Image (cartoon, rainbow, N blue to C red):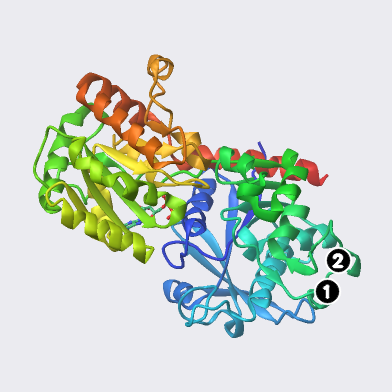
Amino acid sequence: MKTLSILFATSEMAPWVKTGGLGDVAAALPMALHKAKQDVRVLIPAYPAIKEAFPEATLLAEIHSLAPSLPAARLLAAESDGLQLLLLDCPGLYDRPGNPYLDPLGHDWADNHIRFGLLSRVAALLGQEQSPIAWRADVVHANDWQTAMAPAFLHYGGGAASVLTVHNIAFQGCFGGEALVAGFGLPNFSWRFDGIEYHGQLSFLKAGLQLANQLSTVSPTYAREIQDEHFGYALAPLLRHRRDHLRGILNGVDTAIWNPANDPALPHPYAANRLATKRLNKAALQREMGLAEAADRPLFGVISRLTSQKGHDLLLTIADGIPHLPAQLVLLGSGDKLMEAGFADLAKRYPGQIAVKLGFDDALAHRIEAGADAFLMPSRFEPCGLNQMYSLRYGTPPVVRATGGLADTVIDVNEDTLADKTANGFVLLDETPHALWLAMERVSQAWQDKKLWQRIQQNGMRRDFSWAQAAHEYIALYQDAIASRH
Ligand code: ADP
């Protein structure tokens, strides 16, 4: 198979600049493509954190102003672990500290349409004949609204095939009006309902969803859900219209960082064939969190942003029942102040049985994944979700709602799924506190049966969540984009 030249265009990349899931994907997927022998380059703005990380970056090309609203810039070359990075240097636009999208007061930067219009335009340029470097992409892979104009520039200007991945459909990048068209150097006829126009505004995300050759999102179930008004907001009709070009590819996880056999945060590393050791991590976690060191009751774990998306209000409603189940709960999280206060109060009422730590603590997150018996994640929606995959790898069966990536990774325990060895967790039937309670009762019963529990744990631990798997699905997506371009 021919090696593809792939430009991965992104507005964030862990560990240097990260506000959400896109940052993690940008850190992992291009590297997995590189390891799969593809010719991949990552384009990212030269924010201060990026410049600091790559002081040795060299000048590759000067880019003159490409359109009336787009300033001149420079392209720098850097390398990270053998992966080629292209840094878009334009200090007037990107040399700002802090969050890449927001000013210090938490408002969107007023020139975000220029900042990410330029990023999108340069991404497209690198897939066009006029590419300023001796390299040209076969496929430009845009991600979220910040680079979603790249497919539009390629559609109207010719060049590489394009792919757009939606990591979070809630942010759409809507700006100004028709005046932007000329400023970006786009033809007047692009201002149409089936072009870049969206209810009188220019919506970057809508433009990309309309004009990219192929679309994807981060799980197969979420790809179906966003075609429904409830999840896809006003973009659902467009996504339905383009459903033949839309697919879901489950994110991988960093299996080097999340590996119970080799996790420096754990007092007692363990593996699927050494599950007895997991109990020592439970006892250590109970001591660390001030819980009674009870081996005879299941310990539920939670690590989460506390928001209504994650469904922990359902948990708060029924949490008083947990000590009587009997069971214990350990929660690490932060977010909604009312929810924070609710959980802090709960821990005060049930000392020794419910422990809560408000804040962000990566090492403790690892110890909870290892020490808890089961993991609660009753999200209302979840494009992909990481913690349920970490839980599966750590032999800590997740309790989830059947939505988005949760539905694609967690298989409810029943006779059939036990027989075919896929059963790996517990799925709520409904979005209600009662449904969560019933699932926790089922966990408690199954946990008493040590043989059954071990089968469920091992089914989860066996599953392949590596990025190598996802990379192959993206390569197929790129090939389809090239075919539909022709
Ligand atoms: P989301 O990105 O919607 O918050 P995910 O499950 O996809 O949810 O990813 C959340 C990530 O953030 C996981 O790596 C999880 O372990 C981590 N995390 C969330 N809250 C905390 C916290 N309070 N302390 C440590 N890690 C956390």
Observer-nearest of 130 and 245: 245
Percent x, y of residue 80: 46, 61
The C terminus - image quarter: top right
Count of marks, rendered view: 2
Q: Is residue 128 above or below residue 321?
A: below
Q: Residue at x 79, y 42 (%)?
A: 484
Check whether the beta carbons of the residues at disc 2 and disc 1 lie within 8 A of each other: yes
Percent x, y of residue 174: 69, 68
Observer-nearest of 318 and 118: 318
Q: Amino acid at mark 1?
A: Glu
Q: Is residue 378 above or below residue 362?
A: above
Which secondary structure lies at badge 2?
Answer: loop
Observer-nearest of 45 and 394: 394
- Dividing the image into four equal quarters, which quarter contains ligand 1? bottom left
First-in-chain label (2 vs 1) = 1
Percent x, y of residue 45: 57, 71
Disc ID at residue 336: none
Q: Residue at x 70, y 82 (%)?
A: 71
Q: Is residue 59 above or below residue 156?
A: below
What residue sits right under mark 2 in the picture?
191
Ligand 1 within 8 Å, label 2 CB = no
Q: Specify few, some or many for label 2: CA neighbours under 10 Å numbering under 14, 14-19, or 20 or more.
A: many
Disc ID at residue 178: 1
Compared across the picture, whether 5 is left or right of 379 comes to right
Let me know if residue 360 appears in the view.
Answer: no
